[in-house]
Image (cartoon, rainbow, N blue to C red):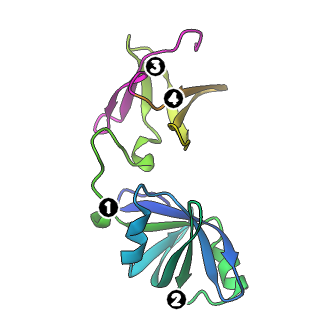
């Protein structure tokens, strides 16, 4: 269920805070200020998605926010949603700056060299302070590519492909 085409992931529940069901949410949005405007969110796992009204949101530490959702009132309630994702409907997605993409749009892209050689599938993204790093896998081989224009030459979401400049010694 997580990241289906009609929803956008904007956070991950990493733990709880206190005894009254507050959730620690790691922000997965480029604009966490959007959290202040949320009246409701979906909490999703691989098997389930459920709507919750938002009672309170406030910044915590770094990229972590505290969420209080209706009907999550105890540590036990909070434990049930740990490692789930906070999502909003696709219609509520924010417009991104040029050459910026949602993580869930990139994961799954087929990656090719400038010469057209298939390298693998973009499986995950390591978010960094200077730049992100794309993890591309094919079989047992894993390739890491910096997410910068010098190496990422084309992203085509409609064709579900990415074209990269291969770094010397990479393959």
Label 4, on which residue? Answer: 146
- Magenta-span inclusion, residue 152: yes
Give the x, y percent position of residue 161.
37, 31
Kindly identify which numbered label has been placed on residue 163.
Answer: none
Label 3, on which residue? Answer: 118
* Label 3: which secondary element: strand
Kindly identify which numbered label has been placed on residue 70.
Answer: 2
Per the model, the C-alpha gap separating discs 4 and 1 is 25 Å
Going from N to C along the chain, the mark reached first, 3 or 2, is: 2
Per the model, the C-alpha gap separating discs 1 and 2 is 23 Å
Above or below for 99 versus 165 = below
Q: Which residue is drawn at 41% across and 76% down?
A: 36
Circle 3 or circle 2, nearest the eye? 2
Per the model, the C-alpha gap separating discs 3 and 2 is 47 Å
Label 1, on which residue? Answer: 93
Could you tell whether 97 is left or right of 29 in the image?
Answer: left
């Amino acid at each position: 269920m997580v990241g289906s085409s009609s929803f956008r992931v904007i956070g991950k529940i990493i733990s709880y805070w206190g005894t009254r069901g507050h959730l620690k949410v790691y922000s997965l949005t480029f604009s966490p200020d959007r959290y202040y405007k949320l009246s409701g969110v979906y909490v999703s796992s691989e098997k389930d998605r459920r709507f919750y009204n938002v009672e309170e949101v406030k910044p915590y530490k770094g990229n972590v926010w505290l969420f209080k959702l209706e009907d999550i009132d105890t540590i036990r309630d909070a434990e049930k949603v740990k490692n789930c994702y906070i999502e909003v409907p696709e219609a509520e997605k924010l417009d991104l700056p040029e050459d910026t993409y949602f993580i869930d749009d990139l994961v799954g892209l087929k990656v090719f060299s400038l010469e057209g050689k298939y390298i693998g599938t973009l499986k995950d993204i390591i978010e960094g302070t200077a730049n992100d790093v794309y993890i591309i896998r094919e079989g047992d081989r894993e390739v890491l590519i910096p997410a910068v224009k010098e190496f990422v030459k084309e992203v085509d979401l409609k064709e579900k492909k990415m074209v990269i400049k291969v770094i010397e010694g990479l393959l």
